[in-house]
Amino acid sequence: MKNKKILILGGSGFVGSHLVGKLVAQKADVTVLCRNPEEIKNIPAFKGARLAQGDITRYEDVAQRVQDQDIIVNLATVVYNTGIFKPYIDLEINCKGQINVLEARKNVNPDAQYIYIGSSMQFGRVNEKDLPISEDYCQTPISLYGTHKVAAENYGNIYHKAYGLPSLVVRLPPLYGPSLTGKETRSIIEKFIKKILRNETFNVNGFGEDLKDFLYVDDVVDVLMRIMESPIREGAYHAGSGVGVKFADVARMIVQECKTGNYELVPFPKELDPFEVGSFYFDISKIKKELGWSPKIDIREGIKRMVAFYKDKKNTP
């Protein structure tokens, strides 16, 4: 990655803070486009990166930074609690932002490698007999976020057909890992660990029976860097744990690792039930075969690392 010019859109967030540090360590020339560089300039994770003020929803900001880049990674997204509707901000960032990137690539830098981050939320509620879910499975999202992510992917496909601009999509499941920015990551595992360390009881919805796919942030960084180093420029890949784990088992692991606390298995709240996707985990055989990637950190080891991180008081927001 030495001397590669890499633009990270939405790079000030959870994944970006981990990715930027790794890229800088490998002597990459990293630019982070974010709304408030002042908020992150003193965070060690961003040391050595160029912090550029800008907004993915403004074409001029994107076009200015896309120019002369070797690689563009689009991490920009808006995430909020399931069942809450923020249609306009979601549309602006996930859809208009994607179009701005595609237009900027077309107009000023068509040769850059482009990596777009997709989501398991694009598939909605699937039939358990179809698990694990492969890349070509029908996408029927049941949330605004998933719907806009599907649309953003389709924009990329259209620009490929119309202008020959390839996009490489990496679809991710729910992520977890330590926050390097001091902000909440919205990871349910993080929330539960913090509750346990405060001696609070947490509720596990759906009695914890659904199978879930969780990917540790170090494995996310690993797969993104592997893609950047590969000659592959197009296609969709699923990067997940490759296995489903019952959420009740995750809760037990957290309590065991924290050596304190308790949880309760409860039904889904009525207001969330229409948006609950049920059991879901990715088939990762394609990315294993074509990129030689597989996750290194299983759920038990990931929880162990997070508990150790948040037991250190200075790391707890």
Image (spheres, grey):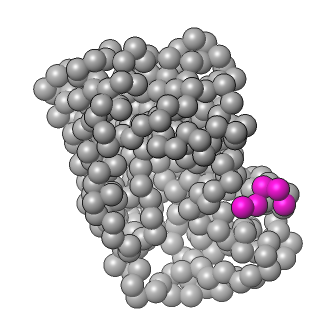
In the rendering, at what x and y percent does residue 48 appear?
Answer: 66, 25
Tell me where residue 199 appears, x and y as whole percent: 80, 80
Residue 127, by quadrant, is: bottom left
Left or right: where 287 falls relative to 57: right
Q: Quadrant of residue 168?
A: top left
Front one among 315 and 232: 315
Give the quarter of the figure containing the N terminus.
Answer: top right
In x, y percent, where is residue 109?
Answer: 31, 17
The quadrant holding residue 76 is top left
Across the whole image, how many numbered discs are drawn on residues? 0
Q: Is residue 149 visible?
A: yes
Q: Residue furthest front?
A: 38
Compared with residue 200, is residue 237 higher up or lower down, i.e. above or below?
A: above
Asked whether, in this view, residue 276 is left or right of residue 143, the answer is right
Residue 239 visible from this viewpoint: no
Q: Which residues are magenta?
A: 313-317
| 132 and 155: which is toward the camera | 155
Residue name at image x 26 percent, y 31 percent: 102
* Residue at image location 47% in from the left, 35% down from the top: 53
